[in-house]
């Protein structure tokens, strides 16, 4: 695990990249939030984020997040950004402050039921498979309207917006197209259903600038903050 000093240095670099992108693309700096992704790093990654004043962390597995949760009592918000099996919906609802990776109708239904059971209104994002890659998680673009309809009808869920992971490709234009596609889809769905869907969670270490250009409101960054993942 890197030192806190190294982390602070990395954080400053990421914040500089964000500020530069906001300036170039005419975005207000406070319109894009940085979510530090602490997956595959020890609990220190969460502690560093908290010490630096960041309010939330992203984790991709229930079990790993639960373990870190048990190792610290600091009050950060925990966001789930990885695929969730519906049989783990109960633990996820208990543990996480938001689930960004809602990728099936079955999962939606389970999360709603489990949230109702503990009297929680669970914020969620709908994950869109913008690359239409059958090996990746997320609703296909053509399934998003039905997913949103069901999510809006789910009384114990609160739909904050949409999330996507760009297709893996050295050509940044591929990510750019995916992000612009998600923003346009959000605009269409918001108009169609008469809801705001303010959150657009898109952009990671390698493509945060094109995400900010396309309208991202939250970038999820691991490697640029914490270095290569350890396990
Ligand atoms: C791991 C992960 C990230 C962070 O990726 P980096 O390239 O390390 O910044 C962002 N989003 C999701 C969904 C992830 O699983």
Image: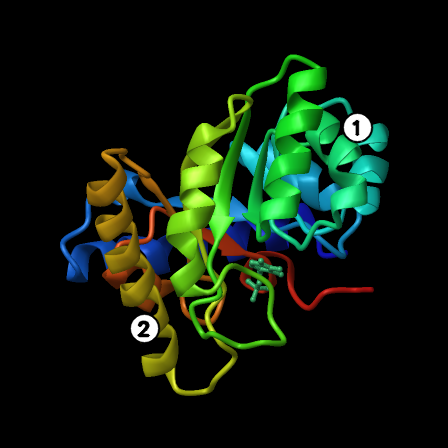
**Residue 15 has which mark?**
none
Tell me if residue 163 comes above or below residue 33 in the rendering.
Answer: below
Q: Is residue 80 visible?
A: no
Quarter the C terminus occupies = bottom right
x 47%, y 38%: residue: 150
Across and down, in percent, residue 120 comes to 62, 17
Across and down, in percent, residue 105 comes to 58, 47
Across and down, in percent, residue 174 comes to 37, 80
Q: Nearer the viewer, residue 125 or 65?
A: 125
Classed neighbour count for the residue bearing mark 2: other residues with Cα under 10 Å, few (<14), some (14–19), many (≥20): many
**Residue 72 has which mark?**
1
Q: Quadrant of residue 13?
A: bottom left
- Respond yes or no on whether mark 1 lies under 8 Å from ligand 1: no
The scheme the figure's colours follow is: rainbow
Q: Is residue 165 visible?
A: yes
Q: Quadrant of residue 109?
A: top right
Classed neighbour count for the residue bearing mark 1: other residues with Cα under 10 Å, few (<14), some (14–19), many (≥20): few
Across and down, in percent, residue 35 comes to 51, 45
**Image quarter for ligand 1:** bottom right
- Respond yes or no on whether mark 2 lies under 8 Å from ligand 1: no
x 58%, y 76%: residue: 134
x 60%, y 70%: residue: 136
Element on which disc 1 rests: loop
Please give the residue where the numbered disc 2 appears in the rendered image: 176
Element on which disc 2 rests: helix
Q: Are marks 1 and 2 in contact (CB under 8 Å)?
A: no
Kindly report the distance in space between the C-alpha atoms of the residues bearing marks 1 and 2.
37 Å
């Amino acid at each position: 695990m890197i030192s806190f000093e190294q982390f602070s240095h990395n954080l400053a670099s990421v914040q500089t990249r964000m500020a530069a992108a906001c300036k170039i693309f005419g975005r207000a700096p406070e319109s894009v939030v940085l979510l530090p992704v602490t997956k595959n790093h020890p609990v220190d990654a969460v502690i560093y984020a908290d010490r630096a004043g960041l309010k939330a962390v992203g984790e991709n597995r229930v079990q790993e997040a639960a373990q870190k949760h048990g190792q610290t009592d600091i009050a950060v918000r925990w966001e789930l950004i990885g695929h969730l099996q519906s049989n783990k919906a109960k633990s996820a609802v208990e543990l996480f402050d938001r689930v960004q990776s809602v990728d099936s109708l079955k999962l939606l239904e389970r999360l709603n039921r489990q949230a109702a059971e503990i009297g929680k209104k669970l914020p969620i994002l709908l994950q869109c498979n913008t690359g239409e890659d059958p090996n990746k998680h997320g609703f296909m673009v053509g399934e998003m309207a039905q997913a949103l309809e069901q999510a809006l009808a789910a009384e114990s869920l609160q739909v904050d917006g949409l999330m996507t992971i760009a297709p893996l490709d050295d050509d940044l234009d591929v990510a750019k197209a995916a992000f612009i596609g998600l923003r346009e889809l959000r605009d269409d769905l918001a108009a169609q259903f008469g809801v705001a869907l303010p959150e657009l969670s898109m952009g990671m270490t390698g493509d945060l600038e094109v995400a900010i250009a396309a309208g991202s409101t939250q970038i999820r960054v691991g490697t640029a903050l914490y270095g290569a993942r350890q396990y």
